[in-house]
Image (cartoon, grey):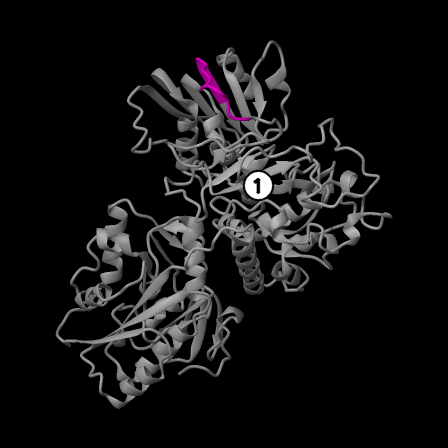
Amino acid sequence: MISRLLAELPAARVFFAGIDDVAPLYSGDRADVVDLDRDLLEPPAEPERSREVLVLAKTPADLRRIATLHKLLPQAERVVVAVLDTPASHPAPVPTPTPAHRWRSLTDLRVYRPKNRVWVVDARFSAETPAGRTVTATARAFAGHRLDVIAAPAAAIAGVGAADWRPGDPNATPSEVGGPVPERVGAPGSDMVLRTLASSPDALPVPPDAGESTGGEPADGDVEWAGDETPIERPTLQAASWERLGRPGMAGSPLADPDVLGEPSMIPPVDERLVNPQGFVTTPSRGMASLAERDGRWSVLLEGKVVTSFAESGGVTDADVARLRQIRGVEVDWRHAHSGPLAAVRVLTGLAAAGVPLVADEVPRWAGALGEDLVKLLTLTPDLSDELRREEHSIRLRRAALRTHGVAARWEQLGAPAPAPPLTSVLLATRRTDMVSFALEQVARQRDARLEVILALHGVPKGHPDVAAAIAAHDGPLTVFEADRQDVFGEVLNLAAAKASGSFLLKMDDDDWYGPDFLADLLLAHSYSGAQVVGTVPEFVYLSSIDVTVHRSQVTEQITSFVAGGTILVERSAFQAVGGFRPLRRSVDTQFQEALQAAGGQIYRTHGLGYILRRGPAANHTWQEPIGTFLQRNRRQWRGFRPNALMALDGSRRA
């Protein structure tokens, strides 16, 4: 495919990332070929021009690193972007310009798939146009046209591989490795600067006999910074190689010091917009695999055969993850680690963020940059042959990895001020005096999230003894109002939303159980999915009338058309845009979700292990389904109340 594109564009300037088989790129009389992962590309003094530009990315994740460097690409009349290994879950990458870049000179746009997993975007213009605009629009299309921002200060990056630290951030400012950061529209170009150095004594201890950096690159640890800023310095892959550091156990090796690469902030973050739990398979068809080095690269091996090999840098891509979804779990083999600690740790953080079940007998001290939570989880011994235990382990891994190694989290670790966590307003409507205390207890269980409660008493007096006692016992922001019993359910919910202050609204039911991480997991799923609504489905149901708990077969971690009404988390702006809930007595959840999708919004369904639906007689519920419905398509059934481990409940808590 590469040879075909090169033949079609013989005079094009070529930029590529993530591609190992580069021989076709340098054959014949090719000129102006740039490897954006290994070549030092710095801002030109004047805008460069080329009639044609060809951009090659191995995967959508690699394209996002190119998008970070889009300001360094020349202007051109034709821009061709090709992604060679695209997971089937990605939509067709039909680019749309941003409002500021309306592509008035666009004359032709072709999006096609010449072969399976390959997508090509071919844009032609009547005048020279920055090629980077086509690249960023295509990268955004692969991610579902989501608002792609990082909650961190405006960043400048400099040095080889620096784009790894701001994947998919077109707002980043590339700088020369010696500075200063170029100004941007009459203001400083960044609030923080990160540069990567092949030999940085300030960033990493180096043994006295380590010599110069390997691979023919000049040592650049003594490159002075010309700007007023103080850059944060981090080592390149070569600077953190075993050749530079000395292998563990060698005399003088700095790896005898647990502080070397011991902090998560020493490694590039995970690009959680593409490397995340989406597509997780609850009942995999393949067995246990191992993570080991093969031909100098970390690879996942199943029955002696390579399932996927990771980049030399250790960066995990969405294509890597897609190939591992049917694997039951991965055992980590730390022996013969030839690639160096940086690549090893990056592979593990990426796989954990994607929810790939990982286990290891032990974690070497030099892998401390994984973070304490991941280190502890890796050395657990869950029964991965049990689907439920396997998913519980996966959820714990992804939580730890995404919260510690995501892009925004990493820049906070580097010194960026942490943004205020969003406020979520819980909309809780009830007609039952005996359920108010239980419902408020479920809200109070939530941790790692800011919330307030809007309690709508639907025909229930605030002064009722049970209600008054429950309100008095609740510790946290609480707004209570009485709605007339004749008001329809949709109207009551809208009244509650009007009294809310949060940027997110969460609809909870008064009789269902919610795990302590339920809300935090929804917010996490919102951050990596970009969907306007996040929720789950009733995967676990307690049938109170017959005292049976069922675990239903459900597909989760995907863009979907429906989530359970008692789990709807919605952006306040999206809620207001569609006019809230319809003034109906029933079906308000379904109608709301239909309206959101009709308006172009997306719904994401995350895992269902933090929620248990309580089901009594159908007459007691707005969702009129008989109990027999919940006894079909079940994975398991238990006599009595049987919460999974993530609910943090014992079987006696049925009240």
* Magenta segment, prevailing SS (helix, strand or loop): loop
Q: Quadrant of the C terminus?
A: bottom left
Q: Residues within 10 Å of mark 1 (few under 14, many from 20)?
A: some
24 or 476: which is nearer to us? 476
- Quadrant location of the N terminus in the rendered image: top right
Query: Picture coordinates of residue 55 (x, y %)?
Result: 49, 24
Question: In the displayed image of the protein, which residue is found farthest to the left?
Answer: 486
Nearer to me, 558 or 641: 558
Q: Residue 219, relative to residue 518: is it above or below?
A: above
Q: Tell me where residue 653 appears, x and y as whole percent.
A: 45, 82
Q: Give SS at disc 1.
A: loop
Q: Is residue 427 above or below residue 394?
A: below
* Residue plotted at (63% across, 42% down): 234
| Figure disc tally | 1
In the rendered structure, the answer to whether residue 281 lies left or right of residue 588 reads: right
Which residue appears farthest toward the top when viewing the image? Answer: 29
Res 144 quadrant in image: top left
- Please give the name of the residue rendered at 57% of the width and 36% of the height, measured from the top-left corner: 162
- Asked if residue 321 lies in the magenta stretch, the reply is no
Q: Work out whether residue 623 can be spotted.
A: yes
* Residue behind mark 1: 231
Q: Can you give x and y, in whole percent of width and height, for residue 623 in the image?
A: 27, 67
Q: Position of residue 456 (x, y in %)?
A: 23, 74
Q: Please name whichever residue, 529 or 116, is drawn nearer the observer in this view of the structure.
A: 529
> For the point 39% across and 78% down, which residue is it?
441
Task: Look at the image and give the residue range highlighted in magenta.
Answer: 42-54
Can residue 543 be seen at all in this image of the molecule?
A: no
- Above or below residue 512? Residue 11 is above
Please state which of residues 305 and 313 is positioned toward the viewer in this rendering: 313
The vertical placement of 383 against 258, above or below, is below
Q: Amino acid at mark 1?
A: Pro
